[in-house]
Image (cartoon, helix red, strand yellow):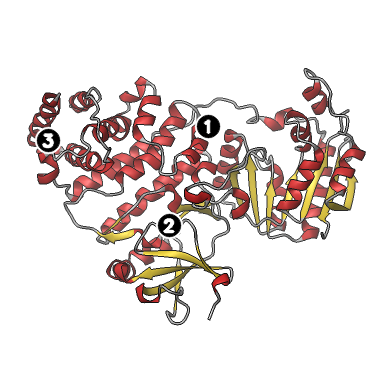
Amino acid sequence: MATHKQTQQLSASYKDPSGFVFVRNGAIYRQVNKVYKDNYDQLMSSGLYDELVKNGYMVGHSTVSQQPQSFEERDTQAYKIIKPKRADFVSYPYEWCFSQLKDAALLTLCIQKMALKFGMSLKDATAYNIIFQSGKPLFIDTLSFEKYNEGKPWVAYRQFCQHFVAPLALASYRDVRFISVLRSFLDGFPLDFVSSLLPSRSILNLGLLMHIHTHAKTQKRLANKKVRAARSGTLSKSALIAIIDNLKGTVQGLHLKKNATEWGNYYDNTNYTKTAFDSKKKYVAKYIEKIKSETVLDLGANLGEFSRVIAPHCGLVLSTDYDCLAVEKNYQQVKLQKETNILPLILDITNSTPSLGFGEEEREGFFKRANIDAILALALIHHLAITFNLPLIKISKHFSSIASYVVIEFVPKDDSQVQKLLQNREDIFTDYCQEGFENAFGLHFEILQKNKIKDSIRTLYLLKKKKS
Amino acid sequence: MIYFIVFILMLFTFVKPAHAYLDPGTGSYILQIIIGSLLAGGYFFREKLSTFVSFVKKIFKKK
């Protein structure tokens, strides 16, 4: 019998009486409660489950025998225990680029349409029901399906508008950086918030007029009112499907403005010669191959050039950058080339996603979720140390708390890129030199390998965390 | 025809908000019924439109 320490209910998994997710001995399980029995049986026997898993839309699971593995104290409520197939990494909507959010939205609608064919409907349409796995969005909330009663409006419609239509509209009509603001609104953007922020020309978009602007007004205007339409009104199946099709069209019609961000055209502005670039690639591949890691975090990955160099040599690359357009381009390439072990995400290492929600435990912070074996920090240290004024010792300590190995490129002050950074500011960075770097990182790491990049004044290091 | 729908929907954008504990569910439900019928439209369009218009008039009359 598992002890209490080894079995733990996931802190975000408490809102749904149908069941909950728990961890036992490092593996994830989902308890299906008796109240959900009929819906679960219909999901499995109607063919919906098979169709969803076959198409790669939803995570598959295996059934675990109920006794004695069911979650303690809750045995009387349990109908079945299922074990979902393991996911590489759970990412949250505020870490996604525009197209990842868009693809997640389209998948949700696709699943809802498919569910209706089998007489079922989604109870919720939150963006947290989706993760990215093998380069594609994947629906993970197996217990989100309920029997469809024709005539009833879609209970998840409001949530779909708040989690998907609203942020995509703001990103498209105003600024793509609005997607990260989702971290402040865990149930998606309130519709009145978005309605007030969108420009007036958004009213010309019929989908936005209906699903955002009018929707926001009806929420305010008709709150708690017993309007006759609510009593006598029904929504036929064809009308519901028409709404879903319209939502699909609205989402598909939202695009990013084609403006350049600071980092979108990065590789046109670097100072490497071809020799230097190839030399760097060679060493980076060699280092990663040597350490045989499962998950590598590529910081400042930009378009993912070096993520692709290391991808064949590790399990998963979290290819992160704080520039939304760079991550967007990276993701487009993942889709185009059908890459399965690169996950582009938006991450600002100087302000990484904290733990959020009630008790600060509903949505775990990035580094709590991530089990990282190695960090790849190429062409990054000078930005952290100079642009962001972070002491090298602090960076060293933070990196040692995240991973056991670090592949890092030291960019000296004489480098033309650093000279650009120092152009219009006072050079207060007295400790920023190769010796200072080695001392700071030497506190927490030992240098396994060190190679100067050919045709460049930069040096690559392979560091291993010292045993404390 | 589509502009007619747009016009009707735009009427909504000018209604005044109610001051009450907000219950977001009712609005979403009703909106779906309305736009659902409009979108599924076709030959039921005229019938639904008059229900719609009277509903809108009711909203306007409230304040």
Residue in front for this viewpoint, A278 or A108: A108
Which residue is painted at 55% across and 48% down in the image? A355
Residue in front for this viewpoint, A371 or A35: A35
Q: List the residue tagged with mark 1.
A: A177
Amino acid of disc 3: Phe
Element assignment for label 2:
loop
- Left or right of B17 on screen, residue A165: right
Q: Position of residue A361 (x, y in %)?
A: 52, 52
Amino acid of disc 1: Arg
What chain does badge 3 belong to?
B
Q: Crowdedness of circle 2 by 10 Å Cα count: few (<14), some, many (20+)?
A: many
Q: Position of residue A377 (x, y in %)?
A: 75, 43
What chain does badge 2 belong to?
A
Amino acid of disc 2: Tyr
Q: Are dots 2 and 1 in contact, CB under 8 Å? A: no
Q: In this view, does A430 lie above or below A5?
A: above
Report the number of discs.
3
Q: Nearer the viewer, mark 2 or mark 1?
A: 1
Residue B21: which numbered mark, if any? none
Give the Cα distance between marks 2 and 1.
28 Å
The answer to whether tags 2 and 1 share a subunit is yes
Q: List the residue tagged with mark 3.
A: B45
Q: List the residue tagged with mark 2.
A: A57
- Left or right of A23 on screen, residue A214: left
